Amino acid sequence: MSAVLNCNITFIGGGNMAQALIGGLIARGLPATRITVSDPVEKVRELLAEKDVHVTDDNALAIRDADIVLFAVKPQVFASILKPLKGLLDGKLVISIVAGAEIDTISKILETDRIVRVMPNTPALVQTGAHGLFAYDAVDAQDRELASQVLASTGLTIWVKSEAQIDAVTAVSGSGPAYFFYMMESMIRAGKNLGLDEKVATALTLQTALGAAQMAITSSSSPAELRKNVTSPNGTTQAAIEVFDHAHISQNIQAALAAAQKRSQELAQDLSDSIK
């Protein structure tokens, strides 16, 4: 983490994900005075100013002394934010967490190749995110390490081999939290139908989800092996799994992720077309 602690970092956009990264970086030792945030919303600037970071609504001013510029804005406003910054990012590492924004699209506007594309996910808000990163060869090992350190302040970082794989990352981890929330909703509803109070069903479901995740992370066994270990022949777990199998749950999950990947590809194309 030492390298990034010597960098000036500018965030274009001060929303929830930016705030999570800012909090993580400060917690890891980056002086707040090395952080600048540009956001058009006064209340956001006031909130961030309480962390002692520099705030402004002038993007060009915000990036002037930056070593790293991280874009954390909505896709629909990305083009209007990028175009006035054309030619101003020379010598700076650019990190984009903007959904659907491909590196070539960003590069053509900003006239720089030092770009890292990231697909984060919302558990970053509680420092347990999973972030997929990609960059072309123009980004050297030092820049890759800096990008890793920035994102690692809020969770796991994984570099993928091609930009196309970012769409797969989007399907697995970018959208992934919603899948688990969906499962939790269903389990809580089922618990209530079986006679449990909602608070009891919720507490049992959430703790079970946390425990299962911790077991999967810390165990040398695969998730499939862990599942088999608690599935006794003719037992209660087997009865439930058989219902899942009969409903083709595994196949449906795979189809759902394929649909998410396809939609990610479509959104990237739409964004690229809108910027041209």
Image: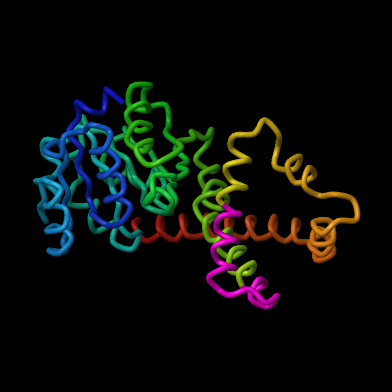
Question: In x, y percent, where is residue 19?
Answer: 27, 51
Q: Which residues are magenta?
A: 189-209
Is residue 96 a member of the stretch shown in magenta?
A: no
Left or right of 137, for residue 170: right
How many numbered marks appear? 0
The quadrant of the picture occupied by the N terminus is top left
Please, is residue 129 above or below residue 90 in the view?
below
**Viewer-side residue, 96 vs 110:** 96
Question: Which residue occupies the foreground of this view, 225 or 21?
Answer: 225
Which residue corresponds to the image point at 36% horizontal and 26% vertical from the top-left? 145
Dominant SS type (magenta): helix
Q: Position of residue 229 (x, y in %)?
A: 78, 42
By what rule are the colours in the image chosen?
rainbow
Residue at left offset 52%, top offset 56% = 177
Q: Quadrant of residue 75?
A: bottom left
* Outermost right residue: 234
Q: Quadrant of residue 196?
A: bottom right
Q: Is residue 112 left or right of residue 185?
A: left
